[in-house]
Image (cartoon, grey):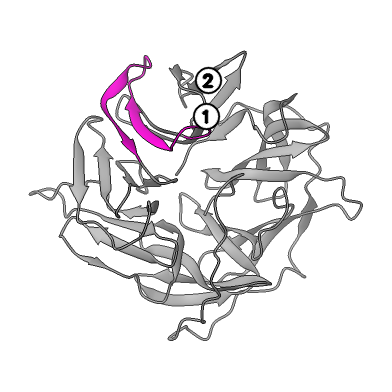
Amino acid sequence: MRTVLRGAALATTLALAAGLAPGSAGSTQDAPRTVLDVRDLEQGAAPAIAWSERRAGRTVVHGAGGTTTPVPDGVTEIAPMGSGHVVQTAGERPTTTRWYAADGTPGRRAWRTGDGLAVSARGGAVAFSGSRGRVWSIDEEGDRVLSFNPVPVTGKGRAVALRGEDCKEDGSSTGCTVYVNGVARGFYTSSHGIVDRPPHLRHVSTGRGPWLGGITSVSDTGSCSAMLRDWRVRWRTCDNRFSDVSPDNRHVLGLPAYGDGFGPTTLDLLATRDGSVVRSFTADRGGRSAVYFDEVWEDRTHVLVVTFQAGRWAVVRLGVDGSMEYAVAPRRAPDLAPPFQLQTR
């Protein structure tokens, strides 16, 4: 569940799912802390993952290798795929998903979809969902599109996680499973043709390989979540909602359990195995620190976030060791129109 500036809140109070393991995540009280004040940081290297930038009336995607690809404005999700990128756009028009070649040439088809891309652990497949629960994937060949049995959601689904690197079942692949959230709950659909609910979770927040995390209950004061490995609950927490899992599966990002206001001001780095807090990035007590959006792991020890502070947007690199530096230097843009978007992983 990446932090974005849009998206409806869950409206129904959900009962705590049965069957949770007794383990609970650790407290943030004893974790090392870094205040999320991103003014006057040192300039570091450019992001090592794809990111988009809107400047002077045009938007380009910066590839990890330094390439630039022109794409439409209103980018909300990016995922490298084959020789190009799967790009999701929104804004004043309905959310649309399309593949773009490295030179910006659009693919043969565009889809009206729900928000969100689901990306496999190594980036070999990307999935998305449309109206009436329809689900599609695009694989590393770029223009090969596969469809799945639809999930029973109303409206447009939100693709969240994908397990497996090749959704076409053949002699060298066992296929994939795509997790999709509806308004009321989450489901999965697989290349085997199976459609069902993920165990223990009402909504899926994140997934990578054998790990799957999501919300078990939500109320007016917060939410509770559980982290599963191979569909068995390993631990639970009511302190955080989950976001991206690190490339080595050792850490998961923990957002505040209750989302409110313009954007979150605290971010916890949690140990995936037991939920213990490895590092907390916290707000300044005077309210002068940054808010952030679009948090994603850059590598196994660094997180990239799009920050807003003192009227300026930036891409900031956060280290597990508490370090902070600019990956993209700050610049001014409208408060509700961040000029940067990070790759979905």
Numbered disc 1: secondary structure: loop
Q: Position of residue 314 (x, y in %)?
A: 69, 31
Label 1 belongs to which residue?
74
Residue type, mark 2 in image: Thr
Choose the circle earlier in sequence order: 2 or 1.
2
Q: Is residue 259 left or right of residue 110?
A: right
Quarter of the image with the C terminus in it: top left
Q: Look at the image and give the residue range highlighted in magenta.
A: 90-112
Residue type, mark 1 in image: Gly
Q: CA distance from mark 2 to mark 1?
A: 8 Å
Vertical position of residue 55 compared to residue 188: above or below: above
- Residue 291 located within the stretch drawn in magenta: no
Query: Which of the numbered marks, if any, corresponds to residue 59?
Result: 2
Viewer-nearest residue: 242 or 229: 242
Q: Position of residue 133 (x, y in %)?
A: 30, 55
Q: Position of residue 58 (x, y in %)?
A: 54, 16
Q: Quadrant of residue 202?
A: bottom left
Viewer-nearest residue: 319 or 151: 151
For mark 1, does the 10 Å Cα neighbourhood hold few (<14), some (14 to 19), or many (20 or more) residues?
many
Residue at image position (32%, 29%) is 99
Vertical position of residue 312 compared to residue 170: above or below: above
Q: How many marks?
A: 2
Viewer-nearest residue: 80 or 339: 339
Residue at image position (37%, 46%) is 119
Q: Is residue 68 left or right of residue 155?
A: right
